[in-house]
Amino acid sequence: MVDISGTTAYSKTTEHVPCSTRAKKACRILAYTIIIAFAITTLFSFVKLSDFFAKIRVSIPYPKIVAKSRLQERQKTTYSPAGVIPATSNKPKVILSWPPGPGWDFMHLRDCAKPVFKSIGCKVDNCIYTEKKSLADKSDAIVFIGRSLGSKPKKLPHQRWIWVTLESSCHTEAAETGGVWAGMFNWTISFRRDSTFFLPYGHAKKRSTPLTKIFTKIALKKTKKVAWMVSDCGTRGQRERYVSELKKYISVDVYGACGPFKCSKLDNEKCLDIISRDYKFYLSFENSISTDYVTEKFWKMFDLDIVTVTRGPANYSRAGIKPEWHINTNDFKSPKDLADYLKYLDRNVTAYVKYLEWKNQYVGLFPKADVYCDLCAKLNDPSEPVTWYPPGQLAKWFIDGHCIPPNDLNFNS
């Protein structure tokens, strides 16, 4: 009875809705709600996921397109030395002397005190000198001897390669700058005034304290006229023909392999002292006539008490040699005219001494330090433009038109 009465009471308050009917209705509403929520969530997720993939497609190109693009870029890009960008860091610049074989010491810096560029007095000394080929890829500049290049290393974009020669244009072959070396060189070092770095065989420097030699007394003690030391008897410049004609008009004593007078190379300094003491004139004739080519033949007589007669390039002033320091065969029409002038000076001591008195004021020097200081400074200059010799241009610059045929051998005209 209790259960029945309790049921009756509850039924009254719920307006007589059976329990089973209400539960079914609630289940249906819940199911619809879940389905609708799931559909909305799924739709929202799909939209967001689509947007994500769209972003991926925009930001990451298809791999095949990337490969094609890079291939086209490589095809358009070609290496040109003119486009190399010079190094601008403050790191020391490494200069490598590239020896073609053992025993070569062209730069003559290996025995200098370390650090080398400071010890030789360079104003800009931020450079390191080496001869180790293993450091080629760490070098900022590599110096190659033109006539003996040796094996070729790999050139890096930041490097300056320097072509060096002291040979005349007449003794330089185009092959020395061609083949695998064509287009490799940026700078040059030579006796030519228009080289990147001017390297003469010698140069004159004014003495801080002049000498006090009395050259009149020195001249009056001389007993012979003309001397010539020579071992190459057949040259491109045909100097031997000129001297043969000259000897018809004045006495010329020829020392060495090409003449009867002997002077050992082992006693070269002693021989030069004897010639300076006994002779009034010395023939400093080049083996070939080439632009700016003035060798040690002139400079080794610079400090001796003798007047030098030169035969070489027409313009000695370009090499820093003043007209009053020598007698130039180019100033005479023939060997006979030259002989007549030398005989005049032989008789006239006052006129002869004028060719010697300047020696109290100057001293001849043979160092190479200046050119290497200039090289170090140029390497450290961030504003220095990149220059290079395209294939064929280095040979054209140094050889073409610069081996000059002699024009003073037509003796019968």
Image (tube, rainbow, N blue to C red):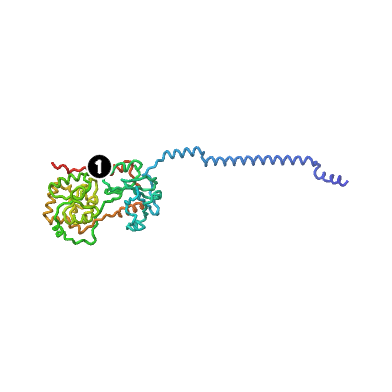
Foreground residue among 381 and 314: 314
Q: Position of residue 223 (x, y in %)?
A: 13, 55
Task: Give the residue at mark 1.
Answer: 401
Judge left or right: residue 243 versus residue 153. Answer: left
Q: Residue at x 12, y 56 (%)?
A: 349
Most foreground residue, 170 or 90: 170
Q: Is residue 56 left or right of residue 157?
A: right
Q: Where residue 406 appears, x then y in whole percent?
A: 20, 43
Query: Around disc 1, counting alpha carbons within 10 Å, would you say few (fewer than 14), some (14 to 19), or many (20 or more)?
Result: few
Rendered location of residue 38, percent (x, y) = 66, 41
The image quadrant that residue 154 belongs to is top left
* Number of numbered markers: 1
User: Which type of secondary structure does the marked residue at label 1 adopt?
Assistant: loop
Q: Is residue 381 left or right of residue 70?
A: left
Relative to 206, residue 99 above or below: above
Nearest to the observer: residue 187 or residue 242 = 242
Task: Answer with the quarter of the image where residue 213 lies.
Answer: bottom left
In the foreground, 163 or 297: 297
Residue 413 visible in the displayed image: no
Question: Quadrant where the C terminus lies?
Answer: top left
Residue at 44% across / 38% down in the picture? 72
Which residue shows up at 54% across the image and 40% down it? 57
| Position above or below: 218 against 25 | below
Can I make out residue 24 in this image?
Answer: yes
Residue 171 in the image: state x and y as whole percent: 26, 44
Which amino acid, by three-letter code, is at mark 1? Answer: Gly
